[in-house]
Amino acid sequence: MEGQAGAAGCGEGFHSWMALNDNKAGMEGLDRDKINKIIMETSKGSKFYENELKKEQQVDQRIERMLQQKAQISEQQLRKAQAQVEKMAADLERGRDLGRVIVHVDMDAFYAAVEMRDCPELKDKPMAVGSKGMLSTSNYHARRFGVRAAMPGFIAKKLCPGLVIVQHNFEKYRAVSAEVREVFADYDPHFLPVSLDEAYLDITEHLRQRRGWPESLRTHPVRTEDAAAAADGEGEQPESQGDSDADSLSPVLFEDSPTSPPDPPPRGAVVFGTDAEEAVREMRFRIEQRTTLTASAGIAPNMMLAKVCSDKNKPNGQYRIPAERQAVMDFIQDLPIRKVSGIGKVTERMLRALEITTCSELRQKVALLSLLFSEVSWHHFLQISLGLGSTHIERDNERKSMSTERTFGEMSSAEEQYDLCRELCRDLAQDLQKEDLKGKTVTVKLKNVNFEVKTRASTLSSVVSSEEEIFAVAKDLLKTEIDNASPHPLRLRLMGVRVSGFVSCEDRKSLQKSIIGFLQAGRIPGRPAEEGQQSFFQRAQALRLRREAGRGDPRDPGDSASSSSSSCPSSSLQPSAPAGPGELFTCPVCFREQEGTDLRSFNRHVDECLSAGGSEAPGKAGVWGSGAPLTCPVCNKKQDTRDLALFNRHVDVCLNQDVLQELGEGPLSHSANVTATAWGKGKPENGHSPTKPSGKNKRHGSPHLPAPKKAKVLVPGNTIDRFFR
DNA sequence: GCGGATCAC
DNA sequence: TATGGTGATCCGC
């Protein structure tokens, strides 16, 4: 999403935190002083304002201390530090990797754009999307008035009385995001979503394959309705200056340019080239065709640079840094450090106090920084100053905490506070249960009416997850604070509860390895939450239902609220899709059928069975179970085997059968020794999209096909799960 | 492990 | 009428 308000030069009476961010697009011809004055007058005297002033002064003191420290540094210390820094810089330089092509894609004013698309009346009006207190994003119209993300609605209204504020509609944004991500997946099946509107891709492999592609694979139809308009240019905001070679490399329009006779593409189609910029242009084009929304992108040898680049020609533009050291250095040279992700308001101020505002200045003074900042910090600074960044997009799979917090009007009654605390615990417990998480640390967060924030934590020897367990801890933490404040009441404006210290995934490894790990699947490591979230049963069931109904698709309908995910496959089935009436599930542990239960109940049963130990369970693999026969969740037929390996193989083949039918490539013999691995990371719904040229549906994004000698059963991810990726 | 801060979206 | 929610990380105890 759009960045928070950033720094701008602050004149008399103004402060960095309220100054307008003038480095964004859409501010042309704006009277910044006037805007700042309005913001100032509206804020002045408020509790919020007072607290911001206080925080600002704290930073001032921090800077003061730093400068004192700096004054005590000797020439010799500095020389020594210099040597150390140069050595490290040389090491880093040796390791510089320019071989990857990393792309950062960012949807333009995403929420606002979605709302405008779906409500044409908003098109010409200044509008913003947000909740009561805070705006998430504004359209470019509104930005001209100084209205932007992270601004409270009432101030925005003062700046722009005609502003239309639209409430969030996250379900819709998630749905649009899912469409966009389908396009991403074609360029990098392992892409890394940052939020609903942002992602990193490594298109190195895509480009390697793309070089050998015929034009037909790089040809994309123009939306039929307004093909002419789409072909006219890139919308209202043409690509900005700086996208230098854009024109020369622009897609050829076949509308009125009859090209070579051989195999003329269909009318109203565009063909893109084979290089990185063309691939990214194509991706943005497809996103726009699909969603009517524009995206901006940055192409660079690492994530840090790609992120900066995506901002450069926003909106609806792209920018590339060639994979050459000198090009990187040239780009970095005058880059304001604030543009770099991770350098925020405070860091910017601290560095500015040392006369560092650009990356070259940063490079110049790293030795000094190594004496004033922690090792982690100055290493980071050095990397930035060299234009280095991660070349390898990887997901932080493991969730480390989960929390709920709420802001409200002043609350001073202890009774109310306890009630609220319980409510928060209840909500949190529910969320924890959805991901089957249990943690050892409970933290309570309090913000008083003066905006002062406090957190109080307690770590237990055992894990907690239920409302009662969490509340038992949280209420004590709260009580301590209430007691401490007495006889005055706590005058709160916010309360939050967090659980962290989740049990290590290691503890669950044994479960994963067992058959149950396979059957449950849960979240697939390395995939975003929304793609791996459904259990194997749910997905198989969906697939079967779809087949029976002869329509629909088996995809997960959307992601959960946050885009974070866990590498630790849940040991519980996800509860979202209850089994239909009459569904029977066979517990893979005790082999008894569980009738008429939803997946959550079924899972609870399985959990109980497992935790009951070996006494009831026939054995880890359950191969010798003597219960009822297993039912294939795909074809829904009882299988004449109790051997889970055989059962798995049947299901596997069953699934492949479906894939092949979906792809229209005929049935596969059930005896064939082919696994879903052949379709690797493919998403089946891409395979039968009628709009794409034929041949395009063959997973060009997936690295290599086949080599599946033998179905490796019982290992999730190699067979059935691959199908769903 | 705790608490305050910083940062991103 | 009066400035958000979620998650991560770092630093100094």
Image: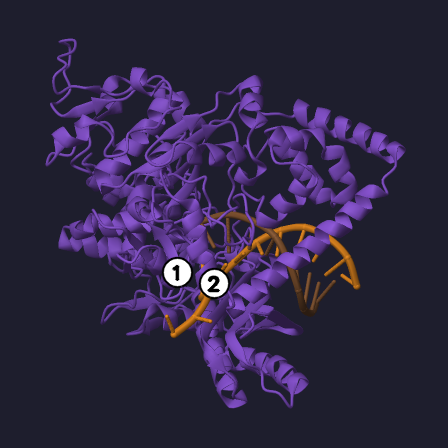
Chain colours: A purple, B brown, C orange
So how many labels did they put on this image? 2
Q: Secondary structure at mark 2?
A: helix
Report whether residue A286 is seen. yes
Which three-letter amino acid code belongs to the residue tagged 2? Ser
Q: Name the residue that disc number 2 marks.
A: A43
Cα distance in 3D space between marks 2 and 1 = 8 Å
A484 to the left or right of A515: right
Vertical relation: A58 (above or below) A331: below
Between residue A597 and residue A487, name the one nearer to us.
Answer: A487
**Which residue lies at the image location 31% right of the left edge and 49% below the top edge?**
A142
Give whichever of A153, A481 is nearer the camera. Answer: A153
Which percent across, then down, holds residue A495? 52, 74
Q: Say if mark 2 contacts mark 1, CB within 8 Å.
A: yes
The residue drawn where x is 55% and y is 54% is A13
Q: Quadrant of residue A185?
A: top left
Residue A291, image quadrant: top left
Q: Look at mark 1 in the image and give the residue it sits on.
A: A155
Please determine whether, in this image, residue A133 is positioned above or below residue A297.
Answer: below
Query: Counting other residues with Cα less than 10 Å from the Cα at mark 1, is it few (<14), some (14-19), or many (20 or more)?
Result: many
